[in-house]
Image (cartoon, helix red, strand yellow):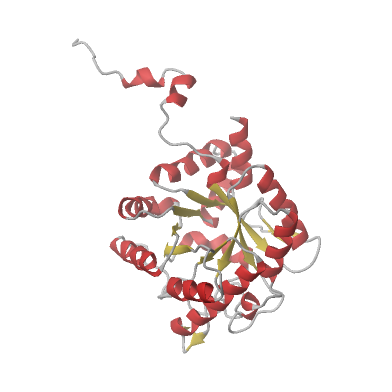
């Protein structure tokens, strides 16, 4: 047999050498934990399709926020479910809205924790769509004005970053203009720049109580078959002033994340969405997979594909596992 000159296995021989040559590293500060907020006190309502995830009143969310800070997470992102919904999502634009109250109270209790607010209307409208309805579809341009108002009240409450997720044309320009006019030039925008109409969102509908009362969101979220369109969407948001870009969902769209990494210089986020989380939890409960191993491998895969930030419901568990390593 010819002499073997190249032996890649030399660098896999033991844990020490594998750690030394590891190309990508996952850290707790890479992870952002989503929180679902509801009115009231001492409420911790399990989301049945997402074991380990709860709808939380603000007092309970503060306790989770403390855990996130202690574990070194990058931050949390807040989603609100108001007591009353209307046709235009008024609670999202009210200084007394559920998310605005949460921002103020979490900031007071855990001042060093980075807070991101989801800036959209689907949890707040009585029809479950991401803006006011005109005919049978969302009125894009009317929604832009309302998005600006929502971002400003979130900034007034003390949020660190806003994250518009509705996939409205021109949303970044509208929000940037509204924030700057109101004196919040330093509040960054994390744009859900590339958000696909996905079957992976199913459990989120229960968590956020935002199932559309008619139709679906395919007229404004992207077609799952499209790749070049993602670059166009991202480029438009960069031009309009986005500070970070996000791809959503995660697992089936890591090629899109890598495309954005190759084309743009902004930090990138990916959303490890509810359906991805639920599948792992269900298989783990059946004993079919090693939950810790699968979660850390998946999150590392997002980093390898180009993610700087990962929004994930696994964040607290993952941070604990990483601290044990």
| Residue beneath the point at 57% across and 39% down | 291
Q: Nearer the viewer, residue 204 or 188?
A: 188
Asked whether residue 45 is in view, the answer is no
Point out residue 173 in the picture as x, y percentages from the top left corner. 43, 73
Among the 4 quarters of the image, the one containing residue 58: bottom right
Please state which of residues 181 and 280 is positioned toward the viewer in this rendering. Answer: 181
Q: Residue at image x 70%, y 59%?
A: 107
- Across and down, in percent, residue 317 comes to 63, 42
Image quadrant where one finds the N terminus: top left
311 sits to left or right of 41 = left
In the rendered image, the vertical position of residue 14 relative to residue 280, given as above or below: above
Q: Specify the farthest residue to the front.
A: 183
Residue 124 drawn above or below residue 158:
below
- Where is the C terminus found, in terms of image quarters? top right
Please tell me which residue lies in front, 4 or 234. Answer: 234
Examine the image and state in which quarter residue 27 appears. Answer: top right
Instruction: Let me know if residue 73 appears in the view.
Output: yes
Compared to 193, does 218 lie above or below?
below
Name the one closer to the observer, 271 or 161: 161
Residue furthest to the bottom: 135
* Position of residue 146 in the picture relative to residue 18 (left or right): right
Q: Residue at 59% x, 38% y: name it.
A: 287
- The x, y position of residue 321, in whole percent, is 61, 36
Query: Within the image, what quadrant is residue 213 found in?
Result: bottom right
Decide if residue 270 is on the left or right side of residue 205.
Answer: left
Q: Residue at x 58, y 75 (%)?
A: 150
Classify residue 166 as left or right of residue 8: right
């Amino acid at each position: 047999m010819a002499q073997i000159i190249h032996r890649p296995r030399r660098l896999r021989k033991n844990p020490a050498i594998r750690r030394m040559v590891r190309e990508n590293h996952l850290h707790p500060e890479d992870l952002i934990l989503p929180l679902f907020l509801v009115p009231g006190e001492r409420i911790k309502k399990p989301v049945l399709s997402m074991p380990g995830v709860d709808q939380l009143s603000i007092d309970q969310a503060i306790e989770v926020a403390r855990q996130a800070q202690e574990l070194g997470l990058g931050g949390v992102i807040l989603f609100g479910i108001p007591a009353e919904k209307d046709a235009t999502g008024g609670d999202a634009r009210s200084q007394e809205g559920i998310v605005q109250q949460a921002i103020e109270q979490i900031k007071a209790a855990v001042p060093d924790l980075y807070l991101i607010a989801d800036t959209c209307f689907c949890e707040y409208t009585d029809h479950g769509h991401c803006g006011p309805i005109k005919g049978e579809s969302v009125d894009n341009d009317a929604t832009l004005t309302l998005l600006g108002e929502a971002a400003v009240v979130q900034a007034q409450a003390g949020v660190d970053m806003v994250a518009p997720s509705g996939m409205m044309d021109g949303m970044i320009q509208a929000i940037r203009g509204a924030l700057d006019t109101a004196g919040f030039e330093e509040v960054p925008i994390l744009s859900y720049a590339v958000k696909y109409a996905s079957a992976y969102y199913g459990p989120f509908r229960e968590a956020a109580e935002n199932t559309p009362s008619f139709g679906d969101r395919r007229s404004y979220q992207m077609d799952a078959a499209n790749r070049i369109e993602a670059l166009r969407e991202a480029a438009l948001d960069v031009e309009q002033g986005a500070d970070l870009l996000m791809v959503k969902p995660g697992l089936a769209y890591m090629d899109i994340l890598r495309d954005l990494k190759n084309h743009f210089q902004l930090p990138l986020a990916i959303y490890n969405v509810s359906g991805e989380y639920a599948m792992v939890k269900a298989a783990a409960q059946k004993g079919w997979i090693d939950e810790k191993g699968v979660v850390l491998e998946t999150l590392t895969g997002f980093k390898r594909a180009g993610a700087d930030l990962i929004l994930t419901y696994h964040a607290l568990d993952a941070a604990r596992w990483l601290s044990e390593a």
